[in-house]
Every structure is written in C-alpha cells, then in structure tokens.
C-alpha cells in the first residue's frame, strides 16, 4: 500500500477515534441525570430545571410511552409534585373522561375532609383499573394533603378526554341522579342498560334531565348544574367520536385529539400539567396529536416532556376487570435511548431535543399503546425533553 494512502487511513481512523472520544466527553454535559424524588440540586439537571422553570410556560405536557409501566408513572408523579409545590402549577389535566373525576376532584378540594382512609376506593371509582400504580395513589394522597395545607391555592384535577365519556356519563346519571330523584325510573333504566344500546339509554337520560331541570338544579346547585350541562356537550361529542371510529379511525383520532386540545385550552386558566400518553402529548410532525393543536395555540408556552426506555420493558396490559397480561419489549435500535446507551454507555437520563440535534441524533422513540401494540415514532420536533429509563417494570399494583 502506498505510504500516502497509509497516512490518509491513519488520519481517518484517528479522526473517528477523536470524534467518538469527544462525543463521550460531551455526554455528561448534555445527558442530564435522573433523580427520583425529582429535585433540581444536581449540577447535571441545571439546564433541564432552568427550562421547565421558565415563567412563560403555561402548560407542561408529561407523556408516557406506555400506560402499563411503573417507572414513567413514578417519575411523572414526582415531577407533578415539583411543579405544584415549587412552580405554582394549579391544575392537573388527565387523559380521562371528566365525568369519572368529578367525585375525586370534589374530595381533593373539600377542606372539611382530611380523612384518607377511603382514598383507594375513591381513586378506583375515578380511574377503574387505569393508573393502578402505587406511585399514582401516593400522588393523589399527596395532592389531598397539599390542598389541605394550601387552601388559598388548591390544585384541581380534571379529565380532558371524550373516549368513554358517554358510557361513564350514562352510569353517573343513573347512580347519582335518577336513583335518588326518581327511583322508579332509575331502577327501570338500570335494567334497560342490559338490553338497550348506549345511545338509546342516553337519549332517555338527557330527556329526563331536560324535563326535570329545576328539580336537578335545586338538588345539586347552580354551579354543579352548569357543569352537568358541560358534561352533556362532551357526551354528544363522545357519541360522535364512537360513530367515527366505526367508519374512519384516522378521522376519529384527529377528532378526539382536536377536542382534547380545546378542552385543555378552556381548562388552562392557571398554570397546568397535562398527564397523557406520548402519542397525545407529542408535537411530532408525523402525528395527529393534541400536542400539535396545542402548539399552534400556545406556541412555546406549551412545553413537552416525553418518556422512553433504553433496555427492556415489561408492561401491564389490561385484559379484564383487575386482570393484566405482561408483555415484554426491547428498545428499538433506531430509538434515541438505544443510541445514547450504545454511543455513550448511559442507560438512563434526560436529554433535550436541541442537544440531540446538535449531535446528529434523529428524534425517534419507542411507543406502546393501551393494548400493547408497539411502534417507533417521532420526527422533526416531537418534544422539548425526553426522559429515558434503563429497565421499565410492570405496574406496582396497590
């Protein structure tokens, strides 16, 4: 081999080595350390804390790559506590039908009730088997105690999803209104639910509410009655969404996320935290998401933190009442966490989109839906920060 070619190859190898060494040297500078419970005292978390502490931010979207993993829920729970206690966020908006969260919110803001002995049943009645993780239950307990000691600045919880709103609303009306105000009609309708379709049951319920407006208003008060009317609007949108799902899943997804974004915007009258799946939080250009709608409305006042994993994930997938299957996944070799793990030998951390782009890393991440279906997604600018874990375990059921 000619000497000049040997010399050229030597310098190419040297350049590659220096490049990799330089990248490895930079790793501690742009991959921030995870801290649970969350705090901003670590030197490696300064930039992350600086950005989420920006006073101009109105909505922080906290995503999870799966609903069935413990670590994302545990980390988000700690971050919620930080944003509430240190940054004056006062609303927690959850990817769940609001009608199921009414009782929970009333309990959280009621300063006359300090007893937490029935908290498990209250949370179960609100969320069913969703988010049945010990860390989420601890967060709700923490919220109750926080509100009790900060009665001039209480935190409220509200649902912003229309998925399932119609079904839950129908049950709510029967058990919270009809049974008490018109027991005969309530008992009959309860039996009818076993043989009549949902839209027929709802038609009867809405007609009964309209015919008994004054009775209902007198019983629950003007404010709660107005809230009931708002729920009725959501019920009609929920039924429209259900019909769309049978015709065109693409249009149904677009409709659902557009409505959620409207509900978030109307609810975010104070600094708000948005708790949802990555697929709804993201601002990826390839996604039909609530996040993209919010970005158009709020611009940089909407701040996003998604979650992911670099190694393996074993998650809980619901298959019946209080029953779960366990499914295992490996991080995709083209995902951000896998690349950071391979290139920098860092298994978990927090990284900004800006730093990823500076290092030429494509913003692709792992995503698992509620049914356990897996895909890799992400394009353009899907988030502000990504939190990634090493190993993700199933829900720690309470």
Image: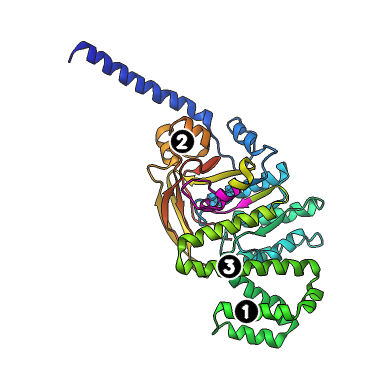
Q: Are marks 1 and 3 in contact (CB under 8 Å)?
A: no
| Residue 121 at least partly seen | no
Q: Name the residue tied to disc 3.
A: 238
Numbered badge on residue 203: 1
Residue 349 rendering spot, x and y as whole percentages: 52, 38
Q: Name the residue tied to disc 2.
A: 346
* Residue in the image at 73% along x and 59% along y: 108
Label 1 to label 3, Cα distance in Å?
14 Å
Crowd rating for badge 3 (residues with CA inside 10 Å; few <14, some 14–19, many 20+): many
Mark closer to the observer (2, 3): 3
- In front: 238, or 53? 238
| Quadrant occupied by the C terminus | bottom right
* Residue in the image at 58% along x and 31% along y: 44
| Quadrant occupied by the N terminus | top left
- In front: 261, or 2? 261
- In front: 34, or 222? 222
Among the two numbered marks 1 and 3 on one chain, the one whose residue lies closer to the N terminus:
1
Among the two numbered marks 2 and 3 on one chain, the one whose residue lies closer to the N terminus:
3
| Residue 299 at least partly seen | yes
Mark closer to the observer (2, 1): 1
Residue 183 rendering spot, x and y as whole percentages: 71, 85
Q: In this image, 260 relative to 179: left or right?
A: left
Does residue 74 belong to the magenta stretch?
Answer: no
Q: Compared with residue 397, is residue 383 higher up or lower down, i.e. above or below?
A: above
Q: Which portion, as a residue range, is magenta?
A: 274-295
* Residue in the image at 64% along x and 81% along y: 204
């Amino acid at each position: 081999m000619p000497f000049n070619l040997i010399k050229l190859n030597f310098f190419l190898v040297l350049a590659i080595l220096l490049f990799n060494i330089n990248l490895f040297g930079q790793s501690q500078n742009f991959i921030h350390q995870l801290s649970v419970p969350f705090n901003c005292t670590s030197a490696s978390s300064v930039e992350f804390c600086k950005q989420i502490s920006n006073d101009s931010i109105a909505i922080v979207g906290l995503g999870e790559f799966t609903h069935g993993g413990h670590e994302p829920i545990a980390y988000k729970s700690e971050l919620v506590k930080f944003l509430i206690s240190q940054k004056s966020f006062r609303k927690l908006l959850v990817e769940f039908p609001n009608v199921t969260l009414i009782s929970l919110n009333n309990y959280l803001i009621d300063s006359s009730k300090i007893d937490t002995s029935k908290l498990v049943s209250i949370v179960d009645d609100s969320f069913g088997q969703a988010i049945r993780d010990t860390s989420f239950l601890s967060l709700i307990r923490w919220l109750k105690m926080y509100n009790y000691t900060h009665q001039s600045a209480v935190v409220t919880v509200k649902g912003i999803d229309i998925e399932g709103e119609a079904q839950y609303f129908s049950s709510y009306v029967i058990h919270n209104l009809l049974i008490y105000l018109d027991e005969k009609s309530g008992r009959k309708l309860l039996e009818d639910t076993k043989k009549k379709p949902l839209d027929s049951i709802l038609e009867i319920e809405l007609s009964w509410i309209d015919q008994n407006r004054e009775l209902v208003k007198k019983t629950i008060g003007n404010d709660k009655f107005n809230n009931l009317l708002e729920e009725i609007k959501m019920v009609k949108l929920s039924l429209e969404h259900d019909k769309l799902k049978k015709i065109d899943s693409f249009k149904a997804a677009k409709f659902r996320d557009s409505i959620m974004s409207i509900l978030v915007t109307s609810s975010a009258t104070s600094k708000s935290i948005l708790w949802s799946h990555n697929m709804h939080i993201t601002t990826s250009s390839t996604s039909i998401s609530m996040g993209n709608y919010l970005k158009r409305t709020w611009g940089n006042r909407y701040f996003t933190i998604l979650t992911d994993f670099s190694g393996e994930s074993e998650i809980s997938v619901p298959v019946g009442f209080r029953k779960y299957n366990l499914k295992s996944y490996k991080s995709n070799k083209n995902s951000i966490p896998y690349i950071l793990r391979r290139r920098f030998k860092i298994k978990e951390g927090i990284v900004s989109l800006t730093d990823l782009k500076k290092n030429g890393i494509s913003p692709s991440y792992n995503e698992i839906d509620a049914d356990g279906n897996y895909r890799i997604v992400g394009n353009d600018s899907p988030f502000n920060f990504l939190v990634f874990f090493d190993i993700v375990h199933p829900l720690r059921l309470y």
